[in-house]
Amino acid sequence: MQAIVAQGEAVGSEYLGALRDSAAVVDDSAELLQRMRKDGYIYLRSFFSREDTMAARRDIFTQLASVDEIEEPAIDGIYTGRSTRDEKHSDRGRFWRSVSETWTLRRLSHGRQLHQVMDVLLGEESRVQDYLFLRPAGPGKHTHIHCDAPFFTGTTQQVATAWIALGDVPAQMGPLFIVENSHHFDDIRQQFRGINISDNLSCKTSLDMSPLQFAQERNTRLLTTDFTAGDVLIFGMYLLHGALDNVSTQKKVRLSCDVRYQIASADLDPRYFGSDPTGTTGAGYGELVGAKAMTEDWHQR
C-alpha cells in the first residue's frame, strides 16, 4: 500500500487516525453541537450529492483544461505539466475569480443545505463569506500546519470553516488532515488569538514543525480519511490542520474548496464580503495560490 506522506515524511499508523463521520446525526442539532465541542470538527460523508459535486468538478476542470493545465476529459483531473494561463489571461486574479464563481460550485458552498448546518454549529443565523478559496493541488503539493484564526477573526471569533471535497480524494492525493484535539491546545490558542494577518503580512501563521514532528512531540495523531466526492469537513478557527502530500503516481489533481461562515449579527469583514472582496492582502483573488499557473512551484502555508 502506498504510504501516507506529510511534508515529505511517511506517517506511520501510530500517528494516523480516522475522522468520525457524523452524517447519520446531521439532523440532530444537539448531537452535532456536542460532537463539535468534543472533537473540534464535524465530518459529513457524502453530504452533497455526487451528481452535484461532480458537476462543479467538471466545470472547474474544464476551465483549467482551457489553459492546458488539465488533460481531457477534464473531469478526470489529470495534470498536463503545462500551462498557457498567462498567455491567455493577462489578469490572474480576474481569471481565478471567474473560476471561483462557477455557479455549480457556489450552489454547494453557498447553498441552503450547508447554510442550515452552519446555523446550528454557530448557534445562530450565519452568513457565508463571498470570498472562496478554491484549491487544485497537483502532484507533490501540500499545506503546512496552521489554524485559521489569524485570517478570519478580524470582526468576530464566531467563525467556522467548511472544507468540501470536489471529487474523490484518497489519502495519497493530499486531502485535509486535522491534528486530533488541537482545539484544546491552550498555547496554540494564545499564540494566534488576536493576530490579524492583514495588519502584518510578514507574521508567522503556520508552525515550523512538520506534521509528523508535531504529532510526535504532542503525542497526538493526524486525522484524515479517503474522502469521497461531496464530503464536508467543518471546524473552528483554532483547530490545527493542513493537507497531506499529493503523492499520486497518475498525475491526479486534488480538487477542494474551503469557505467560511460567521454569525450574521457580527460586523462583516470587508476583506471577504462584497461584490469584489479584497482578500487578505488587498490583491483580491490574485493573492491565492490557485491563481498561479499549476506549473509554478508552491506549497500552501
Image (cartoon, rainbow, N blue to C red):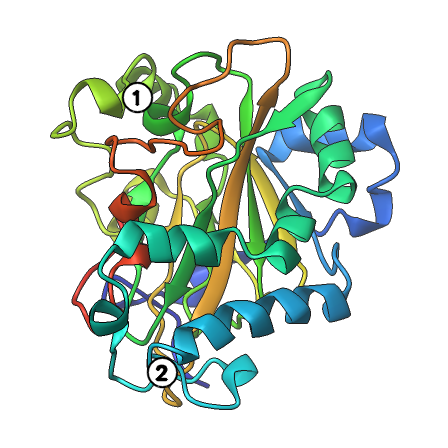
Front-most of 193 and 265?
265
Q: Position of residue 197 (x, y in %)?
A: 25, 25
Query: How many residues crowd mark 2 within 10 Å: few (<14), some (14–19), many (20+)?
Result: many
The amino acid type, in three-letter code, at marker 2 is Tyr
Front-most of 107 and 170?
107
Residue shown at 20%/73% (left/top)? 87
Cα–Cα span, label 1 and label 2: 36 Å
Residue shown at 57%/70% (left/top)? 59
Query: How many residues crowd mark 1 within 10 Å: few (<14), some (14–19), many (20+)?
Result: many
Name of the residue lying farthest toward the left = 202
Q: Is residue 93 left or right of residue 183?
A: left
Return the residue at label 2.
Answer: 79
Q: Is residue 223 left or right of residue 105?
A: left
Say which element carries label 2. Answer: loop
Q: Quadrant of residue 228?
A: bottom right
Residue shown at 16%/28% (left/top)? 201
Rendered image: mark on residue 28: none
- Say which of marks 1 and 2 sits in front: 2
Task: Choose the circle earlier in sequence order: 1 or 2.
Answer: 2
Q: Position of residue 279 (x, y in %)?
A: 34, 33
Say which element carries label 1. Answer: helix
Front-most of 289 and 179?
289
Return the residue at label 1.
Answer: 192
Eyeballing the image, is 162 above or below 71? above
The amino acid type, in three-letter code, at marker 1 is Phe
Residue 229 seen: no
